Amino acid sequence: MAFDQSFLDELAARNDILDVVSRYVQLKRSGSNYFGLCPFHNEKSASFSVSPDKQIFHCFGCGAGGGVVSFIMRAEGLEFPDAVAFLAQQCGLPMPEDKYNPQAGRQRERLLNLMRDAARFYYAELWKPEHKPIQQYFVGRGLRKRVMDNFGLGYAPDSFFATMDAMQAKGYTKEELLRCGLAARSEKGNLYDKFRGRVMFPIIDLRGNVIAFGGRVMDDSKPKYLNSPETSIFHKGRNLFAMNLARKTKREYIILAEGYMDVIALHQAGFDCAVASLGTALTDEQARLIARYAKHVVISYDADQAGQAASQRAIDILKKADLSVKVLKIPGAKDPDEFIREKGADAFRRLVEGSADHNAYRLETIAAKFDLDEDDQRIDFLRQAAQMLATIDNAIEQEIYARRAASMAGINYEAVALEVKRAVAIRRKQQKTAKRRETRTPVQKVQPKIHAMHYPDIVSARAEEGILALIFYDNTFISYFLDKIKPEDFTAPFLRQVFAQANELYGAGHPVTVAAYEAQLDPNELSWLAHIAAQPIPAERERAAEDYIRKIQEQALHRDMQGASEDDPLLARARLKAKK
């Protein structure tokens, strides 16, 4: 959706970035900027900064950056038009009509409406008399109708065209059905219903929109579960099944389960804090989403080997998000759904209350691989346990579990402590080596990470960045630069584009800010632009401006001489002598 620049200027003016970011991040002032822990990657030292003067955020750790709209896009998982609408609603600014491309402006809304209507269609199909056997499937799983209605459960008819016909009758196009993953294309190019003969689980985002579906077969055919593909409205790594409900819980923890039915059974049993990842391994973004609503997580994955492996991976990801993690062991049942049906909600609550700390769980998992009555296997257990214990940063916590490992193996604590000390030393050495490698490549730090933004001349590009930083600091510098340098003098295509647009914005009377570029640049480009704008401004700004221009001109002359030397060495020497 194309927005008028004046509207975007007004939106940025009404949504002060410090106020907006402070709703998500605890910030402390340091000089003219504010710092806190980055909400977009896991860290323990505050490298995330907000500049009220420049109206930008920038993380010196992961590189994320931009203006207030970009922040909301990342924080809320929204596309640009939806982030604009989100902020406009927050400040009471009416959204303008899309003057340039009305269809593009309404596209996301139409897809969301299509998904909502599809969910209603599946729901209505489930409760038709001819689908009594499907209803009995849910009844057999112990679900009450109230809970089924709360989750919007439904049924996709065993037909290649039922969903498409129903949605086209409501005015949606085949292309829209394909775009939101309700239809698929055959090898011959024909469209057909993606979900057929499956019970349907709507996936709903935090704003109550149906954004995807999970479908389960009613027989032994494969795949057992089929999920919506990634679309413009659905990013599976950013969402969690039932998070729209779990975020309202009064419990102090979130239960992370493995499947849709586990989550629904837990909610029915009174555990309204249960969520599940969407047919994939847990992601960092999902962990950070959980961290917005709780500080404690109880992992309740299946008891099989795959579930245990998934628990190990999830522990690392959740810990990086600074979450307290416990792991539930389910005796005599393969998953929470089965346990609750057999033993009841109170029994499950006692399991949750007695769930093991993730360190204890890891130790027990390691111990289960060895026969601790055999000396050689006890040694192997000790080595693996020491490597795990070396990852515990808290000294007291580390000692507690080291003593537990010693007790499990029948080894004195001093021997375990010595092995852990060795493992810690090896780990620190590896970290130092990695850090040295990083500091040995300063040129790579100057270069943008995106290859398409590569700087062909590092020295000139640094000066070009300096010019842009001055412009973002004080727009009046544009008048000074216009008399002395042109966009085509910039060697880096990305920086040339930014400088040219700055001239256009300034000439049209718009403020030249990072926020003014949010509608045109992708997140990576915008992050790099915020990195440039966040650079310290020299005290003698006018002299710095002169130095930047001189540096660009010197580099241009240097490149000319290099080119001449390849064609005519005598001419190159003459030019060099004249310069001296």
Image (cartoon, rainbow, N blue to C red):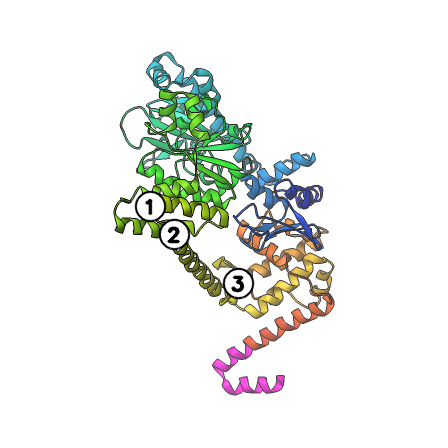
Label 1 vs label 3: CA separation?
A: 47 Å
Q: Which quadrant would residue 247 be assigned to in this image?
A: top right
Q: Residues within 10 Å of mark 3 (few under 14, many from 20)?
A: few
Q: Which quadrant would residue 476 be assigned to in this image?
A: bottom right
Q: Residues within 10 Å of mark 2 (few under 14, many from 20)?
A: many
User: Marks 3 and 1: in contact by CB < 8 Å?
Assistant: no
Q: Position of residue 336 (x, y in %)?
A: 39, 27
Number of numbered discs on residues: 3
Tell me what residue is drawn at x 35 percent, y 39 percent. 308
Label 2 vs label 1: CA separation?
A: 10 Å
By secondary structure, the bulk of the magenta-drawn segment is best described as helix
Q: Which quadrant would residue 577 be assigned to in this image?
A: bottom right
* Residue linked to disc 3: 445
Check disc 1 and report its element: helix, strand or loop.
helix
Q: Position of residue 146 (x, y in %)?
A: 47, 16
* Residue linked to disc 1: 409
User: Marks 1 and 2: in contact by CB < 8 Å?
Assistant: yes
